[in-house]
Image (cartoon, helix red, strand yellow):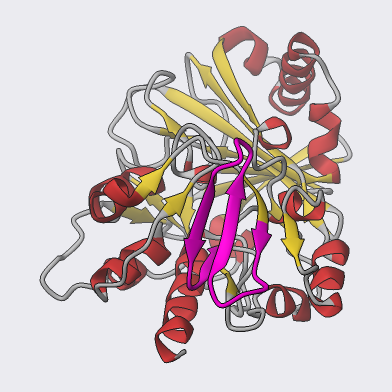
């Protein structure tokens, strides 16, 4: 969507072909769980607030999206060997912790307000591309219904896991270095769980000894932080190996496991005050099937993934970035700016 938005600003004709029946990808959110939007996917802005202005890219439009950062004084709990210890957020995460929460909004809502109106009429949903033929000057993309679309350039923003499954047949085959980069890239699966309780018994963040490893991450956090609400919503974020512990369980087993885990930390408060929960398993989401490129992938991997092919095929998205911190929405939009800049030069 960012690529289309920037092309529209340049007066360049484009069409967005979206495989799913709704736009947004991992910016998915719901209004039905709490009295504020629950971000089932992308949740924080991992950069200064001016990044929103960069995305809008229009001096006459000032984003009014409300964000709230962390002061550094918030409590972070750490549970290990049966003991719960508390630290300030600054002590736990460092003084340079730069995350911002969207207040009564989300990444999806930001795009819906500032980006989507410029691209919606050029967007086609339920269009799964299964073949891209780039042998000639005009590139031919074909969907799963046999319909073809011609273009001078194609920007591929398909989640990395989908490319690893060879869901798109490239003609000719992608260059070997590009294929190798795609095949070898470590992609984490992941899920998010939101639990509502009748009282708040938990700190702003809750970590464990395996909250940050080379194999994955998991953390509980106050999902209602900064919101104007009386509801108490705790989020669970898990990716990589740490997510698999929850993903392999049935729905009921998963809830029992999570409540037991929290009960151990908070002396049974979770079970006593539990109201309801919601789960988003990204591994089972059609046309996505994963979370994102591992945080511990070699820094050369996203660089190779982002390389264009024959000045015809371009790659944009959170994994196809030349930034140091991949995996976030802001980096996906930066990759769009890079790609559009390259297209304008060809």
Identify the magenta region. 132-155
Question: How many numbered marks does the figure carry?
Answer: 0
Residue 317 visible in this rendered orientation of the protein: no
Q: Position of residue 322 (x, y in %)?
A: 61, 80
14, above or below 273, in the image: below
288, above or below 332, in the image: above
Dividing the picture into quadrants, the one containing residue 310 is bottom right
Left or right of residue 146, residue 5 in this image: left
Of the 4 image quadrants, the one containing the N terminus is: bottom left
Left or right of residue 177, residue 125 in this image: left
Residue shown at the point (57%, 17%) measured from the top left: 277
Taking depth in this image into account, of 23 and 264 the one nearest to the observer is 23
Dividing the picture into quadrants, the one containing residue 92 is bottom right
Residue 345 visible in this rendered orientation of the protein: yes
Q: Position of residue 200 (x, y in %)?
A: 50, 25
Residue shown at the point (40%, 18%) measured from the top left: 32
194, above or below 101, in the image: above
Q: Check residue 10 for magenta coloring.
A: no
Q: Position of residue 95 (x, y in %)?
A: 53, 71
Residue shown at the point (67%, 73%) measured from the top left: 135
Left or right of residue 14, residue 43 in this image: right
Q: Position of residue 104 (x, y in %)?
A: 30, 38
Left or right of residue 36, residue 269 in this image: right
Q: Check residue 139 for magenta coloring.
A: yes
């Amino acid at each position: 969507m960012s690529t289309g938005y920037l092309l529209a600003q340049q007066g360049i004709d484009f069409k967005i072909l979206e495989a799913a029946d709704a736009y947004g990808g991992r910016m998915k959110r719901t209004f039905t769980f709490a009295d504020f939007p629950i971000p089932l996917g992308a949740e924080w802005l991992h950069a200064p607030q001016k990044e929103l202005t960069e995305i809008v890219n229009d001096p006459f439009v000032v984003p009014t999206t409300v964000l709230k950062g962390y002061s550094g004084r918030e409590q972070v709990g750490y549970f290990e060997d049966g003991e719960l210890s508390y630290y300030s957020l600054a002590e736990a995460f460092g003084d340079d912790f730069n995350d911002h929460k969207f207040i009564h909004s989300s990444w999806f809502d930001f795009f819906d307000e500032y980006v989507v109106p410029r691209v919606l009429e050029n967007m086609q949903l339920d269009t799964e591309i299964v073949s891209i033929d780039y042998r000639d000057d005009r590139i031919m993309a074909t969907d799963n219904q046999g319909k073809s679309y011609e273009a001078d350039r194609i920007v591929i923003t398909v989640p990395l896991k989908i490319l690893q499954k060879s869901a798109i047949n490239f003609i000719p085959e992608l260059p070997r270095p590009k294929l190798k980069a795609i095949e070898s890239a470590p992609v984490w699966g992941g899920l998010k769980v939101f639990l509502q309780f009748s009282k708040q018994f938990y700190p702003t963040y809750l970590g464990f000894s395996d909250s940050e490893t080379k194999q994955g991450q998991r953390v509980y956090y106050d999902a209602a932080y900064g919101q104007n609400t009386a509801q108490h919503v705790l989020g669970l974020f898990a990716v990589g190996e740490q997510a698999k512990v929850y993903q392999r369980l049935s729905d009921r087993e998963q809830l029992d496991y999570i409540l037991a885990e929290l009960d151990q930390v908070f002396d049974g408060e979770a079970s006593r005050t539990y109201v309801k929960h919601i789960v988003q398993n990204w591994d089972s989401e059609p046309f996505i099937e994963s979370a994102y490129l591992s945080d511990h992938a070699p820094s050369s991997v996203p660089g190779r993934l982002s390389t264009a092919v024959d000045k015809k095929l371009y790659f944009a998205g959170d994994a196809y970035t030349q930034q140091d911190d991949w995996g976030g929405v802001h980096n996906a939009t930066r990759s769009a700016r890079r790609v559009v800049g390259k297209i304008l030069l060809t």
